Image (spheres, rainbow, N blue to C red):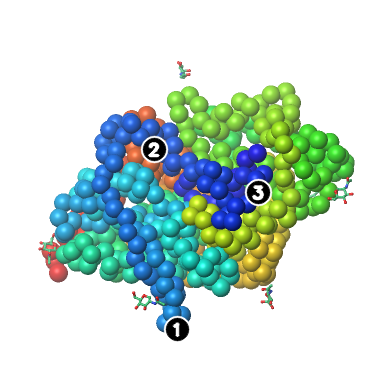
Amino acid sequence: MKTTVLAVACVAIFFTHAQALSPYGFETSELHKRRLWNSVDVNDLHKYNLDAFPPAWSGYLTQPMDHFDPLVNKNFTQLYWIVDFYWKSNNHPVFLYLGGETQLTFDEVTHGHHAQMAKTHGALILGLEHRFYGYSFAQEGLLLPQLQYLSSQQQLADLSVFRGFAEKFLGMSGNNTWIVFGGGYAGALSAWYRLKYPHLVYGSVASSAPVRAQANFEEYNEVVANSFADPIVFGSAKCVASIRQAFGKIEQMRQAGKFDQLQNDFNTCQNLTKPNDFKTFANYLQSRFMGTAQYNRVEGNSSSIGDMCKIMMVPDPYQALVKMFKPSTCWDVSFDDFLEKLTNVYYHPYQVLRQWFYQTCTQFGYYQTCDNNTNCMFLPQVDVDYYLTWCAEAYNISAINVLEQVNFTNTYYGGDNPRGTRVLFVDGTIDPWYALSVLKDLPEDLKFIFINGTSHCEDMAPSNPNDTPALKAGRLAIEKVVSDWLIQAEMEKKHT
Ligand SMILES: *[C@@H]1O[C@H](CO)[C@@H](O)[C@H](O)[C@H]1NC(C)=O
Ligand SMILES: *[C@@H]1O[C@H](CO)[C@@H](O)[C@H](O)[C@H]1NC(C)=O
Ligand SMILES: *[C@@H]1O[C@H](CO)[C@@H](O)[C@H](O)[C@H]1NC(C)=O
Ligand SMILES: *[C@@H]1O[C@H](CO)[C@@H](O)[C@H](O)[C@H]1NC(C)=O
Ligand SMILES: *[C@@H]1O[C@H](CO)[C@@H](O)[C@H](O)[C@H]1NC(C)=O
Ligand SMILES: *[C@@H]1O[C@H](CO)[C@@H](O)[C@H](O)[C@H]1NC(C)=O
Ligand SMILES: *[C@@H]1O[C@H](CO)[C@@H](O)[C@H](O)[C@H]1NC(C)=O
Ligand SMILES: *[C@@H]1O[C@H](CO)[C@@H](O)[C@H](O)[C@H]1NC(C)=O
C-alpha cells in the first residue's frame, strides 16, 4: 500500500506505511524518486540537445554547523557538484543549482532547462545539496539538538561560503556573473539568496517557489480542484463532481457512524473511530489526488489528471475510490504509527520526512488542509489542528510557536511582497503551490511568468519538441530574462 506525504520538492516522494522500519529509517526500496522530467528517457537526451552524461564531479565541503554562533564548535560536510563541461573560460558565468528537501542527484544538476542555458552561455554549473538531506547530514542523527541547525537561513549562509570555496578551488577570475536556480522550496531559497545576498549573485530564477509562509495552506486544495476541472489537462467539471461524490459518501458514512463498513471497504487495520486515525486515513486519500495535480504531465492526448478522471468518472465513484486504494493486506492508517515515522531519528540519505516536517513546524507551515469554507473536494477532517499535532507530538513545538515562526519567516523574507531586484518567479496554473508564490511583477525588476497548463517545476525540465506552446513560450521568456541579465552584467563590468 503506497501513501504519499507531499513535500514541495520537484521530485515526487512516496512513502510506504505498511512495512517495519529499518534502523536507518526508510529502506531505499520504500522510497521512489520520480525524475523531475519523468517522461524523458535517458536514451533520448540527444533530442534535447543535451549530453547524456556530461562529466561532473562531486565533493564535500566542511561547513560550520552554526554560521551564526561561533561558540558552537561543530562541523558537517556538504555535498557539491561541479559540471565544467560547458564552461568556456574562468571568466564565464556560473549557474548555481540549489538542492532542496531531498538528496541532490547528478541527474538533476546536469539535465534541465538550466543546463541547456549553461550550454548556450558557456556557463559553469555548480550544485549544492541542502544541509540535513541526502549525503549532507549530521552524523549524530535527527534529534532536536541536531535539528536546531536546520533552517533556510543556515542554508543560505552555506551557499555564501560555498561561493568563496568554489572561486578558489576552480581558479575563477572573481569576475564571473552568478545566476541562481531552484524549484519548489529550493525555488524559494533561490529567490531569498538573491534578496538577502545580492552581492554574491546577480540574478535568480525561482520556479514554483512558495515564498509566502502560511500555516493553513487551504488554497492548495482549491487549486487542486480547479486543476481537476481544467480542460487543458483533460479535467472537467464532471470529474470534480465525481470526486466530490466519492468523498461525500465517506463523509456521510462517518456521520452515520458506519465505521465498520469503511474499515471493511478500504481494508484498514484500524476501525477509524479515533479522530486522528480517521484524519490520517483522510490525509492519505487526499494525498493521492494532490500528488496527481502537483506532478501532472500532459503527454499526447492524456495527462495524469485526465487518467485519474477516467477512473473516477463512473456511475459509482465511491467504488472507484475503494478500488484505487484497497490493499490485499490491511492498510495501516494509525496516527500513532505515522508519528513513529516522524519521530524516527536515525539518519538515512533518502529519508526526508522528519527533516522536512521539522522545517514546516519551525518556518513555513504549508499545511494542506481541506477546510469547509473552500472548494476542496476531500474530507474536512484534515484541518490545521491535525498538522499542528504533528509539530507538538514529534518535535514538542506548540501551535502558537508554529504560528509565530511562520509570521517571522514572512517578516524576515518579505513573503509574496519582497523588495529587491532581478528575481524571476515562474509558476504554472496547474501547480497547487503557485498560490504561495509571487503572482505579479513587483517594482525594481522582480518579474513573474505564469505558464498555462503546467504543474510543479515543469519549466525546469529540459525542453522537448512535444512541449505545449505555452511551455515553450514560458521557457523562451525565461531564457530572454537570463540572457538580458548576462548582457547587463557585462555592460556593468565594462563601466567600472
Ligand atoms: C571545523 O572546521 C574548521 C575549518 O575547517 C576547523 O578549523 C575546525 O577545527 C573544525 N572543528 C571541528 C570541531 O571539527
Ligand atoms: C572581467 O571581465 C571583463 C569582461 O568579460 C574582462 O574584460 C576582464 O578582463 C575581466 N577581468 C579579469 C580580472 O579577469
Ligand atoms: C475500535 O478499536 C478500538 C481499539 O483500537 C476499540 O477500543 C473500540 O472499541 C473499537 N470500536 C469499535 C466501534 O469497534
Ligand atoms: C489524439 O486526439 C486526436 C484528435 O482527437 C486524434 O486524432 C489522435 O488519434 C489522438 N491520439 C492518440 C494517441 O490518442
Ligand atoms: C464541515 O461542515 C459540516 C456541515 O456543515 C459539519 O458537519 C462539519 O462539522 C464541518 N467539519 C469541520 C471539520 O469543520
Ligand atoms: C517540551 O517543551 C517544553 C516547553 O518548551 C519543555 O518544558 C519540555 O521539557 C519539553 N519536553 C520535552 C520532552 O522535550
Ligand atoms: C501572525 O500574523 C498575522 C497577520 O499579521 C496576525 O493576525 C497574527 O496574530 C499573527 N500570529 C501570531 C501568533 O503572531
Ligand atoms: C489557458 O489556455 C486555455 C485554453 O487554451 C484558455 O482557455 C485559458 O484562458 C488560458 N488561461 C490562462 C490563464 O491564460
Which of pointers 1 and 2 indicates the residue nearer the eye? 1
Q: Quick one: which residue is furthest to the bottom in this view?
A: 71
- Among the two numbered marks 1 and 3 on one chain, the one whose residue lies closer to the N terminus: 3
Q: Quick one: which residue is furthest to the front in this view?
A: 23
Picture coordinates of residue 130, whole percent (x, y):
43, 60
Amino acid type at image mark 2: Leu
Res. 435 visible in picture:
no
> Splitting the image into 4 quarters, where does residue 407 fall?
bottom right
- Among the two numbered marks 1 and 2 on one chain, the one whose residue lies closer to the N terminus: 1
Amino acid type at image mark 3: Ala
**What residue did someone put label 1 on?**
71
Closer to us: 139 or 78: 139
* C-alpha span from label 2 to label 3: 42 Å
Numbered circle sitting on residue 20: 3
Determine the residue positioned at 44% across, 45% down. Answer: 457
Picture coordinates of residue 431, whole percent (x, y):
51, 44
User: Disc 2 on helix, strand or loop?
Assistant: helix
Numbered circle sitting on residue 15: none
Closer to us: 397 or 70: 70
Amino acid type at image mark 1: Leu
> Splitting the image into 4 quarters, where does residue 336 fall?
bottom right
Left or right of 253 in this view: 247: left
**What residue did someone put label 2 on?**
471
Determine the residue positioned at 19% across, 63% down. Answer: 172
User: Disc 3 on helix, strand or loop?
Assistant: loop
